[in-house]
Image (cartoon, helix red, strand yellow):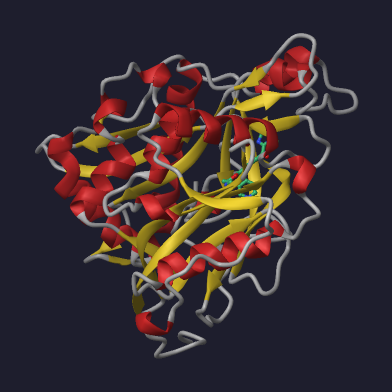
Amino acid sequence: EGPIEKDKKVEDIPSEPYPILSQFEWVTLDLSDEDDMDQLYKLLYEHYVEDHDSTFRFAYSRDFFNWALKPPGWREDWHVGVRVKGTKRLVAFISGVPATLRVRDQEMKAVEINFLCVHKKLRNKRLTPVLIKEITRRVNRCGIWQALYTSGTLLPSPVSTCRYTHRPLNWEKLYDVGFSALPEGVTKSQMLSRYALPSSTKTKGLRKMEEKDVEDVLSLYSKFQSRFDMSQVFSKEELSHWLLGDANERSHADDKRVVLTYVVENDEGRITDFVSFYVLPFTVIDNARHDKLGVAYLYYYATEEGLDGGRFDPASVKVVTKRLESLISDALVLAKNIGMDVFNALTSQDNVLFLDDLKFGPGDGFLNYYLFNYKAYPISGGVVNKEYDMDKRSGVGVVML
Ligand SMILES: Cc1c(C(=O)c2nccn2C)oc2cccc(OCCCNCc3cccnc3)c12
């Protein structure tokens, strides 16, 4: 395992932008500029990833972009746009944010690549390889040689593949928009009662995470994540950004936030667990009754149960499963209470321990993880044919937005 191209030097990397078709020009977006943010928002709102039968399209908000694209150490020149020379219209985008990755026992400075988008009318102009070459050049110029990215489509050699799973919160609406179906011989009221949830959480000591919890949560996160083959290493500042959001985000009411994190504080005032989820709605395309779908995505979580001196103790799988079921079940309640219609999770992390019991159903999508310029043996994505069992847990700890 290790870098494929070794010993590349910054001085060998061209200082000039990668050549691009003459009608286009490179543009570095300044997301603190309202017009640039509007152009990015509109491009992705109309042209970003849809599901295979074009029923839904991601509806990233400006707040989401500020959170996802401006973590500690972010660089403006990694917010790469392509615009038409004449009209100055933004027609393509790709982004990178800094991340420290651990792949098995190797830690590396890397970037996470996301939000690759090309205008629908320019899909056959081979712009994607050019976007990838240009962001690679800009990242290499900073002395960074590895990258992590995901894709719903299959490209050469994923390091891991996880499956989409969904837990209905508002089954009726999912049925109305055609996402959920009514199984043969089952009534709507039976489906509603199957997915009914309590109106309040049940885990003792559960409360919102605050800045003062960052050190305890980071310590718990790091111990919990050490069991995975691929994990993101966080500084205190990075953990605070990803779990509490940026300053602007913290001033928002719960139903206006992009990320929510809760901790469990025990009787001695210690943090023994935490759970987080991020909010990313879908535009419902061409539906008479609904134009938005509220979607929460399971993000990072950890429990100290089963952490025998920081290492995972396999004999404790039952108590860990019970603990996680209680924690994630509360996340479902919290997501429903801020208006989410469905709670999404992958088969990554230790999710397969609780997906079935919490009534997550397998989706028809898969998320492939790719490492750029790093050869790694395959990592389990937790995708199993039969019911989930312990030794089929995934080795993927990192969650990509
Ligand atoms: C996307 C997504 C969906 C849906 O498409 C969906 N849910 C309800 C209705 N729909 C159509 O379901 C998931 C379950 C787990 C993780 C997921 O995504 C994980 C993060 C995805 N990152 C962005 C991305 C999107 C598409 C392809 N690659 C990356 C998803």
Can the viewer see residue 369? no
Instruction: Looking at the picture, tell me which residue is in the foreground, 241 or 38.
Output: 38
The residue sitting at the front extreme is: 86
Residue 232 sits above or below residue 249 on the image = below
How many dots with numbers?
0
Residue at the (46%, 32%) spot, across then down: 37
Position of residue 282 in the picture relative to residue 148 (left or right): right
Q: Position of residue 87 (x, y in %)?
A: 63, 35
Q: Is residue 344 above or below residue 364?
A: above
Tell me: 5 left or right of 168: left
Pinpoint residue 68: horizontal percent, then vertical percent: 42, 43
Q: As displayed, is residue 197 above or below residue 325?
A: above
Residue farthest bottom in this picture: 7
Residue at left offset 28%, top offset 35%: 246
Residue at 46% in and 28% down: 35
In the current view of this chain or complex, which residue is farthest to the right? 184
Query: Which residue occupies the foreground of this view, 59 or 379?
Result: 59
- Residue 14: tell me if it is visible: yes
Provide residue 198's location: percent of width, then percent of height.
48, 17
The image quadrant that residue 265 belongs to is: top left
Q: Position of residue 362 (x, y in %)?
A: 70, 45
From the viewer's perspective, is residue 348 above or below residue 9?
A: above
Quadrant for ligand 1 reads top right
**Which residue is pictured at 40% across the width and 54% down the height?**
77
Residue furthest top as drawn:
289
